[in-house]
Amino acid sequence: MSAPSVDRGQWSGKLGFILAAAGSAIGLGNIWRFPYTAGENGGGAFVLIYLGFVALIGVPVLLAELAIGRKTQRNPVGAFKALTESKFWPMVGGLGVLTGFGILAFYSVVAGWTLGYLYMSLTGGLAGVTEAGASAAVFTNLVTDPVWAIVLAGAFLLLTILVVRGGISGGIERATKILMPLLFVIMLILVIRAMTLPGAGAGISYLFKPDFSKITTTVVMSALGQALFSLSLGMGAMITYGSYLPEKENMPFAGVSVAFFDTLIAIMAGLIIFPALFATGGDPSGGPGLVFVVLPTIFNAMPAGNFFAVAFYALLAIAALTSTISLLEVVVSYFVDERGWRRDKAAWTIGGLCFLLAVPSALSQGAVAELGTGGLFSWDFLTLNNNIWGNYSLSLGAILISVFVGWKWGIPSALASLEASGDRLPAAGLWGFLIRYVCPVVILILLIFIVATGTYF
Ligand code: TRP
């Protein structure tokens, strides 16, 4: 295949790729969604099943996406175009691009809240929040203020645009090379702090001691949905990132490292939140408010709490930023590769449009109700977007990508791309089996389950 005509840029090497791809994977999904999902689903048993899905479904699909990306050196649409004659498969890539846009539009709203909390922790807005009621009021005040909700989401999108317009090695790689190690260090400090609180042991056993009586279909399905979302799978983010990895780099190693770091950070988030929660007598099944509502009271109850609050919300914002970068990058790379747009123009245009779509989501958490307007704008757009793009579309995409690699493009071609540097994929036979038979079937069961039960994760 001929090389792409425009200069697309590349990672400077394996480390740049691993950090950027791990940056995509590690986000609100690990630090905000994983702990509350684990908490709602009984702790240890959920964590164990989650780890199993990361290994058996997540890693194989991740490698499949990377293989497509490196072989074609294109965005998801261009990648499928390059590998098939059919009109159908590029549409799957198109669905991925659309999904990236859709996820970005609600993800940036929640990411905006992290900026709001960072601001409050820096300016003393969280001081004196020592009990759950007061903390819930702070959260409600933030998300129901129409100006704040819109400004914060917009600010977050602006940061994302500024990095993506800088391109691959100059923008994304440079940002993640600083942000990811910083994130790791801040988290490590917080893990040590949380685990040495009196009474922390109960939180640790909650996270690691599986209670098998807690396993239900919903627990299993949420674990799978969480594994896909957390690894940024099913919409071509990893196709796009893999497309910037030079041929000489060891792709199986890079892919497995990304999954490893993503899982490590999720577990570390659990090791911050649950020990801290149990030490202060909180409830693990607090739902999506866990990070925002529960943690401020915990910070205020610990020594040097405000320092840890600032550190925590800063790292949450950092983690979210390296994820929103990857979401915008998928859409931008499509317009750069397929439509010949300048990167700069694509980043501003797509980011701007995304802001327009983010506004209804930002206003949907109570701000519109506050304004007294009803009708269409009182829908919960945030949850709706999360379901359409974050659940249905991602599962469908992951099924189709597995079917494509397993049955259409073929395991031998995919393996050749994965092993292009000469480094072997360990257990390649097992990988082929999982991609052909296990991944499509298991993820199809998930899709049927969420459609049939209307379950939201
Ligand atoms: N994985 C990220 C997180 O856990 C979110 C994310 C970024 C994502 N890019 C994605 C999810 C692509 C699905 C697909 O926060």
Image (cartoon, helix red, strand yellow):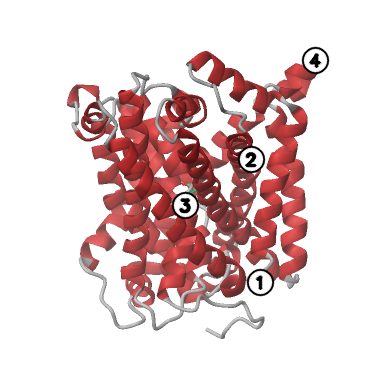
Comes first in the chain, label 4 or label 1: 1
Relative to 105, residue 168 above or below: below
Mark nearest the camera among 4 and 3 is 4
Comes first in the chain, label 1 or label 2: 2
Residue identifier under label 2: 112
Comes first in the chain, label 4 or label 3: 3
Relative to 322, residue 48 above or below: above
Q: How far apart are marks 3 and 1 (CA)?
A: 21 Å
Q: Distance between the residues labelled 4 and 2?
A: 23 Å
Task: Tell me which amino acid carries mark 1.
Answer: Asp
- Tell me, for residue 337, which label it has, or none: 1
* 231 relative to 366 in the view: left or right: left
Residue at 36%, 26% in the rendered image: 277
Ligand 1 contact, mark 2 (Cβ < 8 Å): no
- Tell me, for residue 232, which label it has, or none: 3
Mark nearest the camera among 1 and 2 is 2
Q: How far apart are marks 2 and 3 (CA)?
A: 20 Å
Q: Local crowd at mark 3 within 10 Å, few (<14), some, or many (≥20)? A: many
